[in-house]
Amino acid sequence: MDRVSTRRQLLVTALAATIPSATLALKAPAPLAGTTRPYRIYCITFRGMTDVEKGFGDYLASRRIPVELIYRDIDRDVTRVPALLEEIRAARPDLIYTWGTSVTLGVVGPYDTPTPDRYINDIPVLFTLVAAPALAKIVRDPKAPRRNVSGVTHVGSTEAQMRAMAQYRPFDTLGILYTSTEANSVAVTSDIRRLGRANRFQTVERSFRLDPQRKPVADGAAEMVREIRDAGAQWLYLPPDTYLGTLAERVIVPAAMDVGLPTFASTEQLMQAGALSGLVCRYYNVGQFTAHKAERILVGKEPIAAIEVETLSRFSYQIRLSAARRLNLLPPMSMLGYAELITADHSAP
């Protein structure tokens, strides 16, 4: 066996343990019999309501927990967060819910910030859909946050995702397209570089162009996909990137299909956009799990600094058969025992 094949085999080892179908098994305090007033939860979303919020609200309703949910959306503009902090300080909610890395950092700041007074540090902050909270400096140790923030992640470990791709199609060059102003994407891309050095695969990276206000724009996105393929990439990895998600279905995935480049999704949204395969968990279940932690904080009175940052215990390895047939990349027989095969046409999230 040559050295490249050996590296690929090492990357594949122990994949199957990471990818059974998603499940949600929660143990929670008993439902409230009554309370003097509803708990007030101030919720900041990044791009409007998603299935995460639906799962969050449904769980609280099913547990008969009286809550007042105050929603504020920043419409992908993190410069709106400081004004919301002033509103939060005046309203003094019982809990703050934050969606995504950029919003969470805007509320609590990195753990090593030299200006902690700029952020909220005396109200519990519960995040959801944060891909890499330690890499983004939201918490030092996910098992023991030791500050006023905890939450739920939605992305399998970077190493597990690399193994998943290699199990389907071995590679020594990986393409990545990401947004340089999104902390999630920057952190995950950095981690992939680290894994590349350790496992001797290289990366071909492109980031979306920015306008004068440093907002990402779609100009040249399809051409960047072609550049990644021409540079020798055997996969195009789609990181947990909100702006990428807005372009995936109409620009990125079609461009990759046109040049014969298979795509791997890190999130349910990107899988729904038409990616060939992905290691994902359901957004609705992420919202439920986040609400379970909210119950522990509000009803169980557990200190948030001691609540572990977690993700769902199981993920689904999904493969889209229509894309596999078009790319002539049907999955190997060894994967059929645990992969979830998607036969229907993809639909927008």
Image (cartoon, grey):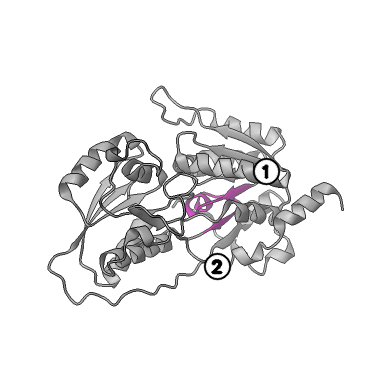
Q: Quadrant of residue 233?
A: top right
Total marks shown come to: 2
x and y percentages locating residue 240 in the rendered image:
50, 47
Q: Is residue 271 magenta?
A: yes
What residue is shown at x 59% (from left), y 31% (from top)? 224
**10 Å crowding of disc 1: few (<14), some (14-19), many (20+):** some
Image-based side of 188 in relation to 117, left or right? right
**Magenta residues, start to end:** 263-280
Residue at horizontal 26 percent and vertical 69 percent from the top: 299
Question: Looking at the image, which residue is at 45% across and 34% down?
Answer: 181
On the question of residue 330 being in view, the answer is: no
Nearer the observer, 19 or 243:
19
Q: Residue furthest left?
A: 36
Find out whether residue 334 is within the magenta segment: no
Residue that numbered label 1 is attached to: 196
Which picture quadrant has residue 12?
A: bottom right
**Looking at the picture, how far across and down is residue 209, in whole percent?**
50, 28
Q: Which residue type does callout 1 highlight? A: Gly
Is 118 positioned to the left or the right of 164 in the image? left
Give the amino acid type for the residue marked by disc 2 in the picture. Answer: Ser
What label does residue 21 carry, if any? Answer: 2
Q: Which residue reaches farthest right?
A: 1
Q: What's the CA distance linking mark 2 and mark 1?
A: 27 Å
For residue 314, say whether it is visible: yes
Q: Earlier in the sequence, mark 2 or mark 1?
A: 2
